[in-house]
Structures are given as C-alpha cells and as structure tokens.
C-alpha cells in the first residue's frame, strides 16, 4: 500500500513538470521579454525602447522662471488744457474762454523682461518702456528695483535695462539654431498684469515678417501671448531661452450685424530669436546703441517671372538714398543685387542681416544685373542712419 502511494505521488509530480515546461514554451514563443519586463529589467538588446511624452514641464519652468521679471513703466501724458468761461459777462464777450492749467495723466505700461546677466542687465521690448520716465522691475521672488535704460533699438523693438540687485538669476541661452518647427515651447511673462504666467505651445514657423520694422525674423508660436507678455521669455522644454516674446496677431475685428467677422486669428504670437536679441544686447552694452553697416538702398525680393511660383534668389533695388554709398557707386532703382562678397544673396532678409552685420567702413563687393547686363561694384559701407532719415 505504501509503495502504491509513493508511485502516485511521483506520477503527480511528473505531470506538474510537463505542464510547467509547456507553459514556459508558450511564454517563450508568444511573449518574448515578458519575464524580463515582469522582473523590471530592460528589454532585450536591439529591441526598440518605448518613448513616453513628458507629462510635466515643471523642471523647465523652475529653471527659466526666476530669470523672467515683471516691468512697470510709468509715464506722464499731457492731455492739453481745459477752457474755462470768463466770469465777467463783458469780458466774456471779448475773450470767450480762457485756458486753464495743463491736464496731465499718469499712465503705466505693463510688460516683461529677461535677466541676461547676474550683474543686472535686463532685456525687454522697446515698446514696453518707450517714453517712460520711471521704470521698475519686479523679480519672480518679489524683489523690486528701479531700472536705468542703457539703450534701445527701435528697429528690432528691443531695449536694455540695468537694475541693482544682488544674486540675480541669469537666463540660460539655448543654442542659436535650436528652434525648429514643431518644437514644444513655453511662454513666460506677465499677461494683463496678472503676475508671472506660463503657457505652452509649439514653434509654428520661423523667419516670419510682419513688416513692422526693418529687421524681422520672428519665431511664430501658438503658445498664448497676451498684452503684458511683451519682453518675456520663450523657452524650450529644457528651460533654455530661444526668443523674446514681442507681438501678437492683430485682434479679431468686432462682429458685424450678422455676427461674422472679416478675419479671425487665434494662437498666432511672435518672438524675436535669441541670436538677434543677444546681438542687440551686446552692442547696446558696448556702444549704447546698435551700429549697423549700410549700403544705402531700399530693396525687395525679386518678383517671380512670368507668373512662376518659384522666386529667384537676390533682391531688386527699389530706391537709392541720395548721397549714400550705393548712390556714389552708381546703383539705380531696378538693379538686381545677386551676390555679396562672392556669396549668393538669398532674399531681402538675408541681405539686410548681412549688411547690418558689417562694420561701417567695411569695403564690400556687390555683383548684380542692370538691364540684364551683369555688373560688379565695390562699396564702402556707411553707418545706418536713424529710421526717420532712411525711410525704413
């Protein structure tokens, strides 16, 4: 009887072993890596790793937010004089009304700024501080300082301020070529005076022009940018600065009687690329202004020929400023400029940026066409005058 029990036990164990081997075979055949995943180990070498989108950008905000400040620019606006009637009837018939004292109003412009260095240089938009007689900068940690205007550049809508506060958190600047269409970006600023606010979107386009000034190469984004965000930071998901928030698309017009509007736009904001902002900052700190080379012509992109959708490289001269280097070199309206110092001119943006990067006094070699005939001239660049004298 005892032998029979031992035999039954051994048979049961043998059947369990067979079932276990079969289960192992099935798992190995149909679920490779399952055991390793259950154990918490990595997939087998060569297997594609699963990519998981980040669920939070808190680390990027924590890195970038301390270097973004609120700016309060105050200025006094003169409204004119109020006229008062003369009390005496006879005198009133002669004089009518007499002017009273000047009426003035104190306005405050709200904006944002980015701390670029630990010694107090802050970059913001020119339109935020234009005309202000009292500017205050409030840091994210609550500290406040009166700001001095070091210089401004209306052609890029940038201005540099200086504040006197210890241990300032300077921004981390991204690689100059870091912004690409589709990148996730965060806009940090002080919208409508609410205090520091963060919005998220993507880079919608690069190289945009709004025809507001001579030097434009905007990053377009759908991250919400509102009034008060001007001068704030556009950062990547590492918290690195890629642009200075500057403009929004014009607001939607008021609806007509049928409730419709002529045009509608949402999620269209613009930022100045950090490479442009940094170049302007460095020149203003060094010279108090931006010094640009100047050929002395207004130019536009060459229009497509014969209705072609493909635009030719180069620019067409629209106007030659009298007495300018271009005038002295004999350039004329209608001339095509095709190469600068041996390198092709891509378009008006390309030439404008390359021209501005050259120092006044630099001798440049221009190649182009006049009435379809090729020409080449050497031009000694001057310093670009103020916009009011160039017509820009």
Image (cartoon, helix red, strand yellow):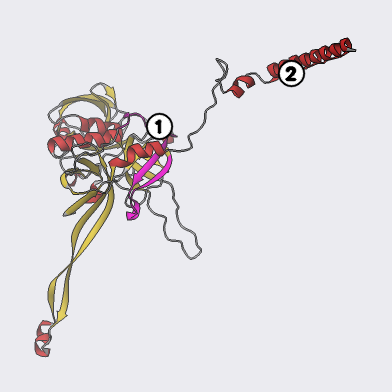
What x and y, as percent, mark residue 340?
Answer: 24, 25
Q: Which mark is residue 260?
A: none
What x and y, as percent, mark residue 84?
Answer: 15, 79
Q: Residue 180 carries which label?
A: 1
Farthest residue, direction front? 2
* Side of 142 relative to 3 (left or right): left
User: What range is drawn magenta here?
Assistant: 173-201
Q: Marks 2/1: CA distance?
A: 50 Å
Residue nearest the observer in this picture, 227 or 326: 227
For the question of whether residue 192 can be seen, the reply is yes
Vertical side of 294 occupied by 139: above or below: below
Q: Mark 2 points at which residue?
A: 23
What x and y, as percent, mark residue 246?
Answer: 31, 45
| The stretch drawn in magenta includes residue 191 | yes
Residue nearest the observer in this picture, 77 or 343: 77
Quadrant of residue 180 within the rendered picture: top left
Q: How crowded is mark 2: few (under 14 residues within 10 Å), some or many (20 or more)?
A: few
Q: Which residue is drawn at 21% across and 56% down?
A: 74
Q: Which residue is drawn at 54% across and 23% down?
A: 49
Residue nearest the observer in this picture, 28 or 118: 28
Q: Which residue is drawn at 19% across and 62% down?
A: 77
* Side of 261 relative to 159 (left or right): right
Residue nearest the observer in this picture, 132 or 364: 132
* Side of 190 relative to 294 (left or right): right
For the question of whether residue 348 can be seen, the reply is no
User: Which comes sooner in the sequence, label 2 or label 1?
Assistant: 2
Q: What element carries label 1?
A: loop
């Amino acid at each position: 009887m005892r032998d029979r029990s031992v035999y039954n036990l051994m048979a049961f164990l043998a059947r369990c072993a067979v079932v276990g081997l079969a289960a192992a075979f099935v798992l190995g055949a149909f679920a490779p890596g399952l055991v390793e995943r259950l154990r918490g180990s990595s997939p087998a070498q060569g297997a594609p790793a699963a990519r998981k989108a980040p669920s939070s950008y808190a680390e990027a905000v924590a890195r970038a937010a301390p270097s973004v400040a609120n700016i309060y620019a105050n200025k006094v606006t003169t409204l004119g004089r109020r006229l008062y009637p003369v009390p005496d009837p006879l005198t009133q018939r002669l004089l009518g009304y007499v002017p009273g004292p000047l009426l003035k109003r104190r306005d405050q412009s709200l904006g944002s700024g980015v701390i670029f260095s630990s010694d107090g240089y802050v970059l913001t938009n020119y339109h935020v501080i234009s005309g202000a007689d009292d500017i205050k900068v409030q840091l994210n940690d609550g500290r406040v300082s009166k700001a001095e205007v070091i210089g401004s550049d209306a052609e890029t809508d940038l201005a540099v301020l200086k504040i006197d506060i210890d241990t300032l958190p300077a921004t981390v600047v991204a690689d100059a070529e870091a912004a690409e269409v589709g990148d996730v970006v965060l806009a940090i600023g002080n919208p409508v005076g609410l205090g520091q606010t963060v919005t998220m979107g993507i880079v919608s386009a690069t190289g945009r022009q709004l025809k507001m000034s001579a030097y434009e190469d905007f990053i377009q984004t759908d991250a919400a940018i509102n009034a008060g965000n001007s001068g704030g930071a556009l950062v990547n998901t590492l918290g690195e600065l890629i642009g200075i928030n500057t403009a929004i698309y014009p607001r939607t017009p008021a609806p007509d009687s049928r409730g419709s509007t002529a045009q509608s736009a949402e999620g269209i904001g613009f930022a100045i690329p950090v490479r442009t902002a940094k170049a302007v900052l460095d020149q203003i700190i060094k010279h108090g202004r931006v010094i640009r080379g100047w050929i002395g012509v207004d130019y536009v992109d060459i229009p497509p020929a014969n209705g072609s959708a493909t635009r030719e490289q180069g620019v067409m001269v629209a106007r030659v400023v009298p007495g300018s280097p271009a005038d002295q070199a004999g350039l004329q309206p209608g001339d095509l400029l095709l190469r600068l110092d041996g390198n092709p001119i891509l378009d008006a943006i390309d030439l404008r940026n390359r021209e501005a990067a050259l120092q006044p006094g630099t001798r440049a070699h221009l190649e182009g066409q006049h009435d379809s005939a090729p020409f080449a001239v050497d031009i000694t660049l001057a310093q670009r005058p103020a916009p009011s004298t160039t017509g820009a």
